[in-house]
Amino acid sequence: MDAVYLYKHTNSDELFYSIRLLQKFYPDLGTIYVIGDLPPTRLYGEVVHILHRSIAGKFADQMLKFALAVRIPELTDQFILMMDDVYLTAPFEPYRMYDRKYPMLNEKIKSRADDPYRKSLIKTDVYLKQNDLGTRNYELHVPAVIEKEKALYMTNNLIDTDFDLQIKSLYFNFYPSLDGLGSVPYDDVKNIKIEDVNAYLSTSNVKFAKYKKFLDQLL
């Protein structure tokens, strides 16, 4: 199974460690696609880079990159959707996880200050309701297994939107019974304590250095 990174450069170490740990903990990994900014030179030859200059806000930009990814002819029928600040810390298990703390999008919206992320969550919630779909919140900092053809169909239905939507919540609510894979509650792993790390970790750019020694020990 291939992996896709929707990449906007902030800290090249994050992408490097994310890919190295994905390679370690998922030995059946196929091609790694990096869509967006140029990856660090030390990854040249190990990834396929598709240049995509940012032309929209953060979340619309991510959705545009995602729409580009699912149109790659060589991409495997199923692929792992990754972000550069997400790290595997144990062998990969393809669960479909929703937020244990804020299981529904409206609960997550209420917890947020008025920022671009909250605006995108609101647009996602509205879009799903307008299309008589569920509104479970899948916005966790964890990998997600995506079916290319289903994602292609979904993105084709976004032509009349501004694309400022959350990918995982849109996709998994669009296909709520995907291949019988049940949803499981999970706690978000952004900047969690090292002693609480189980299978995944995610770091913010400014706090990456705090976790670097721990990630080094995993490699």
Image: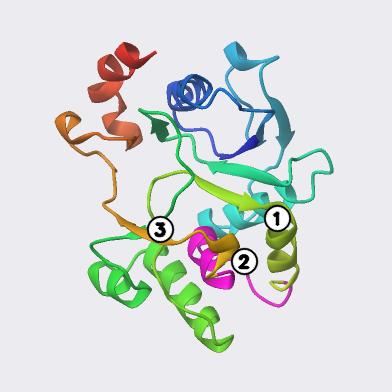
Residue 129 image point, x, y percent:
50, 85
Secondary structure at badge 1 equals helix
Q: Amino acid at mark 2?
A: Phe
Residue at 29% from the left image edge and 43% from the top image edge: 190
Residue 19 image point, x, y percent:
52, 24
Which dot marks residue 15?
none
**The magenta segment:** 159-175
Residue at 37% from the left image edge and 67% from the top image edge: 118
Residue at label 1? 67
Q: Amino acid at mark 1?
A: Ala
Residue 47 image point, x, y percent:
67, 23
Is 173 within the magenta? Answer: yes
User: Can you tell which of label 3 and label 2 is closer to the viewer?
Assistant: 3
Residue 79 is left or right of residue 107, and the answer is right
Which dot marks residue 163?
2
Residue 43 found in image quarter: top right
Is 186 within the magenta? Answer: no
Mark 3 or mark 2, which has the lower sequence index? 3
Q: Crowdedness of circle 2 by 10 Å Cα count: few (<14), some, many (20+)? A: many
Residue 41 is left or right of residue 206, and the answer is right
Residue at label 3? 139
